[in-house]
Image (tube, rainbow, N blue to C red):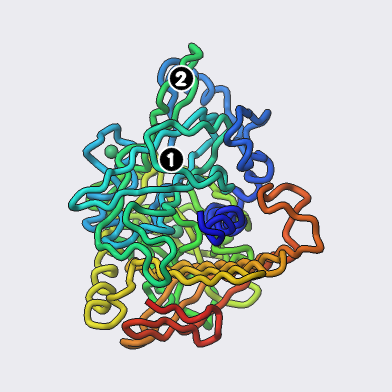
Amino acid sequence: MAPWEVMMRKSVFVLSALTVLAATLSCNEEEASDSQVTTEQIDVEQTSEEPVNEEPVTPEEEIIEETTSEHHPSANLERCYATSINTPESNFCPENVFDDDPNTYWATMPGAAPDEGLFFSFEKPVIISAISIQVLPGSGSIEGIKYYQLYINGLESPIRRATDEPVPINAWVKSIFIRIDATDSMESQVNGIRYAGNLPVGISEITLLVMNGNGDEVPLLVHPIGRTGGHVQASSCLEPMEAYHTDFLFDSRSEFGWSDGNQTSTGDGENLTFFFDQPQRIEKIKIWNGYQRSQTHFDQNERASVISFGADGGNAPKYQLSDTMEPQVITLDTPLEDRSFTMNILEIHEGATYKDLVISELRFFNGEEWFVLDSGESQSRKHDILEWAQNTSADAFIDKQVFSSYYAEQEYFTQTLVLRSNGSFILWKHREQDGDTEIMYADGNWQIIDDNAVRIFGRLHRIGRYSQASYDPYSGVRPGQEPDMDRITIFNDILEFDGSHISSDRGMFEDFTF
Ligand SMILES: [Ca+2]
Ligand SMILES: [Ca+2]
């Protein structure tokens, strides 16, 4: 293994853990430290004493769970997304990995592989003994996955070769992220685009092994989130619309949400109307209030405080919302059955900086399952971006990971960037110098400025560990061993590019060449 590779593997953990930590709900941060599932513990037999953040179980629920879980334990997904999905998205969606059908699979956009991944979380934590991941083998139409990395409850485990072998977990699990690290034909030491091919990668099945009531190890039945066709009409939407669209209410990513578009007035008086293709029954709604991209985003923007929810046109009852990043369940005064429903924002919690009301995620409960509204519009926005890219030099790198690194006596530096056709991006920067480690991680949205420039904006996370502080890069993030520097800020930057370079206006990263 080349020295840079060793260094990269031993020290990538903070960054990677943070990627997912940040990508999961704020409550997962708490779970991550509470559950103390660390890199080492995932490999050894270990069961934490307490479930993390488990919601109180009512006696009624307990009985139901016991009867259904005796021989076939099951769990409901709360959030499930992939950072890149091939089109048509309904054919390659991440839910395909839980349908017990090896012929259906999640697949990335062509050429997208390193740094892409699949995330899922459960409504309630589950004790999982092992996970088995069936990756699609390389073929004429699929690039094989060579290495992947698991993040359990937001904390990373070692990079693994992709095999069918079950990976032991033996812990309470709230969330799992599978990050693709390398593919079969990837040139890991080349600066530029390391996976230069134009094929997707894919996973056909994920099997989670759990103990049933008889003490036998059996596959967990995973219930996906329901999905119903329709569209949403918002009273307004913040520009650029591709960053604050109502689709983000249902995309399972808490760091992307809908924002109202009246920047000079507060969000009370705004509303959302949900139109379904078929009549729906709604008994409860679940809301991730505010802009949950970071605590700063949450504080600076408005949150809903009182809403009404009812069939369109009717006299709708009012409901109070807490000012918290935890998901909140509202049980409706009476179950509703209709084709359209309106949520009115009646009162707000003030934002420290902006008068933009944001809601990050929404779910509806029909008495049997939680479901989302699927408008399909994200796909048409992706189509527009790809069409733009095909007519510019962005075509060379859209959806592909661009990489650069150098290795000197006392210094190692690496950075990667992926600008995705779904309007999101991820940037990683990592420097080791004289025993100090500095990591920068940024993600969020991007918008087209012209044929040679895009604007990126989102959250910027900087982490530093310095050699005067005792720090073992193999040891993982432990309670009481927080980094010497850990800051999340809101940022934006302009990227300028041509057919072989990408540069940052603000010098956020060194130029990429490819
Ligand atoms: Ca499948
Ligand atoms: Ca969202």
Nearer the viewer's eye, disc 2 or disc 1?
Answer: 2
Give the answer, above or below, for where 35 lies relative to 310.
above
Point out residue 141 in the picture as x, y percentages from the top left corner: 19, 53
The type of residue carrying mark 1 is: Leu
Q: Residues within 10 Å of mark 1 (few under 14, many from 20)?
A: many
Q: Which mark is residue 375?
A: none
Asked if the residue under mark 1 is in contact with the one under mark 2, i.e. CB atoms within 8 Å, the reply is no
Count residues near mark 2 (Cα–Cα under 10 Å), then give few for <14, some for 14-19, many for 20+.
some
Whole-percent x, y for residue 491 in the image: 56, 77
The front one of 427 and 361 is 427
Count of numbered labels shown in the rendering? 2
Residue 482 x, y percent position in the rendering = 74, 56
Is 101 located above or below residue 197 in the figure? Answer: above
Pick the residue in front: 404 or 206.
Answer: 404
Residue underneath mark 1:
77
Which structural element holds mark 2? Answer: strand
Mark 2 lies within 8 Å of ligand 1 (Cβ measured): no
Residue 382: name its quadrant.
bottom left
Q: Going 53% across and 54% down the picture, which residue do you hit?
A: 20
Task: Choose between 462 and 142: the one closer to the eye.
Answer: 142
Alpha carbon of mark 2 to alpha carbon of mark 1: how far? 20 Å
Residue under the point 36% across and 62% down: 247
Instruction: Tell me the residue at 37%/69% (across/down).
Output: 193
Name the residue type under label 2: Glu
* Quarter holding ligand 2: bottom left
Q: Residue furthest top?
A: 214
Q: Residue at x 58, y 34 (%)?
A: 43
Report whether residue 344 is seen: yes
In the visual, does 355 lie left or right of 366? right
Residue 217's disc number? 2
Q: Is residue 338 left or right of residue 191?
A: left
